Amino acid sequence: MRDEVEEDDYAFYIEDLRPIQLSRFDFDGYVEGRKRFTRDEWLDIVLRSVGLEGGMLSPRLKLHFVARLAPLVEPNFNFVELGPRGTGKSYFFSEFSPYSTLISGGQATKSVLFYNNARRRIGLVGFWDTVAFDEVAGIKIKDPDTIQIMKDFLANGRFSRGVEVIADASMAFIGNIDHSIQQVVASTEHDLFIPLPKEFDLAVMDRFACYLPGWEMPKNSSDYLTGNYGFITDYLAEAFHYQFAHSNRYEEVTRRIRLGKAVEGRDEKGIKKTVCAFLKILHPDGPPSDAEFEEYVAYAIECRRRVKEQMNKRKPDDEFANINLSYRSFSL
């Protein structure tokens, strides 16, 4: 809107006013728009919205990039990505969504993360959709209670600090692996959780729903940047935030699959929540086809199996020996 002012009266005037954030998000319109595209077309739009050209990526890499977005759309989703430097891990949680916060190393305290008893105020998990830990190896945890509270929160989104606290925040742990992946895999002494802080015991690891193999991700390069149109990131972030708070696809996923006998309680929860995230991101308008659904389930099982394989390597007895996870799908 232009202010009609005399040229000599004011040094400045408003020529145009544009909001930098949406004042209202129309989810129904978003869903209707999705119906105009195939799954693969929509997947490319999502990738272009974060600056990537889908035509330069393999189908597997596309799923990896979607998995990076999962903590932004699925509540209480526990995600870990470990890999080499320069693959854009931090960007997804620091720049893409205003509902995500990135903690860059330093000391992680129960007061900051969970609840401050002195102020009677909830910590970061009560204010953000996603709390991401960058350079996870550098996290300093001095109070053992912090880990215990983290375990409770990762398990079911609640904990007790004199008061019972319930929050929906997802947690993402991202860090760098400086070792050769082939050497780590062949080693009898090391596993792919090697960058995690020593305070992260098996009970913490067992709560991870998805381990994304960061060593498969391409290094940042202009070759992968898109020159085509996608959504403004604020718009797509609002769509994810809306689904984070208002959409639950868990029952839908449960109706369509039966998991194999080796799948235990936390395996089942992690696998289903990963699939839920994929449905929210790629199919906000309704159920996917059977072929698409099975693709997501197979990927989710792989991500959870990677967690169990490393735990079994660290503790090679019967506790985490059931690593042959499988499923059988059902049509609608």
Image (cartoon, rainbow, N blue to C red):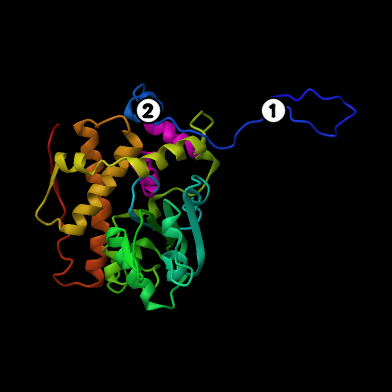
In the rendered structure, does residue 301 fall within the stretch colored magenta? no
Looking at this view, is 121 or 133 the one in front?
A: 121
**Of callouts 1 and 2, which one flags the residue occurring earlier in the amino acid sequence?**
1
Position of residue 34 measured from the top left corner of the image (x, y, whole percent): 36, 27
- Front one among 290 and 35: 35
Q: Is residue 57 magenta?
A: yes
Q: Which residue is mark 1?
A: 16
Image point (35%, 71%), residue name: 162
- Residue 161 % position (x, y): 36, 70
Residue 29 lies, with reference to residue 186, above or below; the image says above
The range drawn in magenta is 42-71
- SS state under label 2: helix
Q: Nearer the viewer, residue 291 or 252?
A: 252
Distance CA(mark 1)–CA(mark 2): 29 Å
Q: Residue at x 37, y 27 (%)?
A: 28
Which residue is the site of mark 2? 28
Residue 313, quarter of picture: bottom left
Q: Is residue 14 above or below residue 105?
A: above
Residue 41 point in image, percent of width and height: 38, 27
Residue 25 appearing in the image? yes
Instruction: Please state, as top left, top right, bottom left or bottom right, where the N terminus lies in the image.
Output: top right
Q: Quadrant of the C terminus?
A: top left
Tell me, yes or no, whether the two marked residues, 1 and 2, touch with CB atoms within 8 Å.
Answer: no
Relative placement, left or right, of 144 versus 89 is: left
Comparing 229 with 226, the one in front is 229
Task: Kindly state the secondary structure of the residue where label 1 is placed.
Answer: loop
Determine if residue 185 is in view. Answer: no
- The residue at the point 15 percent across, 40 percent down is 255
Q: Position of residue 262 (x, y in %)?
A: 12, 57
